[in-house]
Amino acid sequence: MLSQQLKGNIQFLNSVSTWEEAIKESATPLLDGGSITPKYVEDMIQNVHENGPYIVIVPGIAMPHAKNEDGVVKKTGISLLKLEEAVPFPENKKVNLLFTLAAEDTSGHLDLISDLSSLLIEDDVREKLEQSNSEEEILDLLQTVE
Amino acid sequence: MASPAKATTDSNVVDMNRPSARARVQAFGGFLTNMVLPNIGAFIAWGLLTALFIPTGWIPNEQLAQIVGPAIKFLLPLLLAITGGRMVGGQRGAVMGAIGAIGLIVGSDIPMFLGAMVIGPLGGLIIKKFDRAVENRIPAGFEMIVNNFSLGILGFLLMIVSFLFIGPVIESANNFVTSAIEALVATGLLPLLSLINEPAKVLFLNNVIDQGIYYPLGMQAAAETGKSIYFTVASNPGPGLGLLLAFTFFGKKTARRTAPGAIIIHFFGGIHELYFPYVLMKPLTIIGMIAGGATGIAVFSMFDAGLVAGPSPGSIFAYLGLTPKGSFIGIIAGVLAAAAVTFLITSLILKMEKNKDEEEDELSDSIEKSKAMKQQGKQVAGSSKKEEKIDKISFACDAGAGSSALGATTFRKKLQKRGIEGMEVKHYRIEDAPQDSNIIVVHKDLYDRAKHAHQDKEIITIENYISDPNLEELLDRLEER
C-alpha cells in the first residue's frame, strides 16, 4: 500500500536552505497530483510554528502533516523527500527524510501509517532506507516489509 | 462538582479503595448533572418560544408555534441522549445514544426525557463494549468499514428495541398514575395528590394528568360552584419558583447562573418544563417539590379557593386572570406558601450536597495523593504493582490523524511482539481523547495542551514515535503486571 502510494512521489535533493522549504519541496508531488491544495502546505508549516517540531517522529525523519480543514486535502496521499544534507528543524532537530502525509480523514490512511510504522520499527530496514538513493531501491525495500 | 470525567478516571483507584456507597451515589448525581447542564440553553430557547407563541402565549403566532411540538419531542430528548452517550462512549457513543433515543421518541406520545437519559448512556456503553471487544482484531485498512457498520447495525437493533419497549412502559405508567390519582381523590386528602403529581410532572406526564384527569374533574365542579380546586392541584407555579430560587442562591456554577432566567420563563411565562431539568439533575429535590405542592393544595383548601378554568400555561398571570372574586387571597397565599416550602427544603438539600461534594473532593484529592505516592514508591523500588489497571492507552496529537496514528500503530505492534493482550490503543485529537483513557501519550511539545485537556490523567511524553525510552518503559511496566 505504502509502496503504491509512494510510486512517483519520491524525490531526492542535495540540500535545502530551511525546513519550511523542505516541507514545500516534499509536498510538490502531492500538489501536482491534486491530493492537496497550496493551503495545506501552509497549514503544515504553520502546524510546526504553532505546536513545535513534533512532526519529527524519530531522529532524522519528519512526517509533515496537518488537519484537513476546509477541504485542503482532496485525497489521501503520501510523498517522500530524501535530502543528502540534513536540514535543521526548530530545536535544532536535523532531518533528512520527510514523509509528507495528507490524510483526508482520521481513518482512511491507517494502512499507510501501518506500513510506515513497519518500515521504521526495524533498525536494519531503517538503515537500508538511509542508504537508498533511487526510487526503485526504496520501493523494493518497502515491499519487503508490507 | 464530581464530574463524570473524574469519576471514570478514578475508577481504577476507586476499585482498589472500595468506594463508599455514598461516593457512588455522588458520582451518579454528578453524571446526571453533566448530562442535563450543557443542554439548559436549549430548554430556555424552547421555553421562550413556547411562552411567546403558543395560542395562550403573549404574542400568539400559529406559524412559529409549529416549532414547539417537534422541539420538545425531538430536539430536547435527543440532546440529552447525545450528551449522555458522549459521556460514556465518546463521539461514537453520542451517535449511538441518539439512534436509540429516536426509537423511544417515536414510540411514545410524550416527551421522552427520562427515557433519553437512560438510553443515551446505554447506547454509549454498548458501543464502547463492542469496540473494546473487537479492538486489535480488525485487519489494518478495515477500521473504517468495521466502525461504521458496527455502529450502524447495533444502532439499528437498539432503535427497534427501544421503540417496541417504550410503548407498553408509557401505557402502564399512565395507567398507574391515573388509578393512583383516582384513589387519592376518593380519600378526600387532596394534598397527598402531590406525591403523584410532582414526579409525574417531571417525567413529562403533566399534560396527561392535567388535561386527562384534573381538568375534567375541575370542569364538573366549576359548572356547579363556579370554581374548582382541581384546576390548581398540578398547575401551581409556586413549587417551581421555590426550587429555582433555591438553585439561584445555593446551586452550583452553571445551574446557579441559569436558574434566574428559568424563573422568568417558568413563573411569568408558565412554562413549567423549564424547572424539570433542575430536578432531573438533582433527583432528591423532588422531595421539596412534593412538600411545596402539598402545602399549596392544603392552603387552597383551607381558604376554599379555586380557579374558574384550567390555567394553561400555568403562569402567575394565568392564575390571577382565572381567579374568581373572593378567592384572590387564597390563591396568592397558596402559591406563595408552596414557593416558600419548596425553597426551604430544596435549599437544605442543595446545601447538604454541597458539603458532601466538598468532602468528596477532599477524599478524591487524598486518593490522588496516595496514588502518586504509590507511583513514586514503585519507581524507586522498581517493583511492579500487582493490580495496576491499564487497558486504554490513547495517543494524541494536534490533528489526531498523523503522528498519533503512527505512534499508536507502532505501539500496538510492539505490544503484540511482547504478547501483551487486552490493551486498547487508539489515536485521537488531543481534546477528543476519551475520558476513560488510563494513559495519554503525546509529544513533549504538546504536553501543555494535553495537560490542559486532561488534568487528572497520567500523561506520558515522547520525542520519538517509534522507539522512545518512555514508551519502552511503559511496555516494561505493562509486561510486569
Image: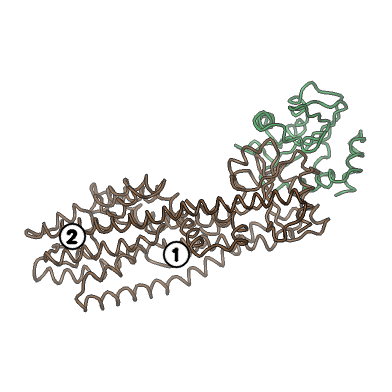
The quadrant of the picture occupied by the C terminus of chain B is bottom right
The residue that appears at 37% across and 53% down in the rendered structure is B351
The residue that appears at 48% across and 72% down in the rendered structure is B164
Of residues B96 and B329, the one drawn nearer to the viewer in this rendering: B329
Q: Residue furthest top?
A: A17
The residue that appears at 14% across and 54% down in the rendered structure is B321
User: What's the residue type where badge 1 is placed?
Assistant: Gly
Counting the numbered discs, the total is: 2
Q: What letter labels the chain drawn in green?
A: A
User: What's the residue type where badge 2 is placed?
Assistant: Gly
The residue that appears at 66% across and 50% down in the rendered structure is B373
To which residue does mark 1 refer? B115
To which residue does mark 2 refer? B334
Q: Does the rendering let one see residue B269?
A: yes
Side (left or right) of A18 relative to B264 = right
Classify mark 2: helix, strand or loop. Answer: helix
Side (left or right) of B240 relative to B116 = left
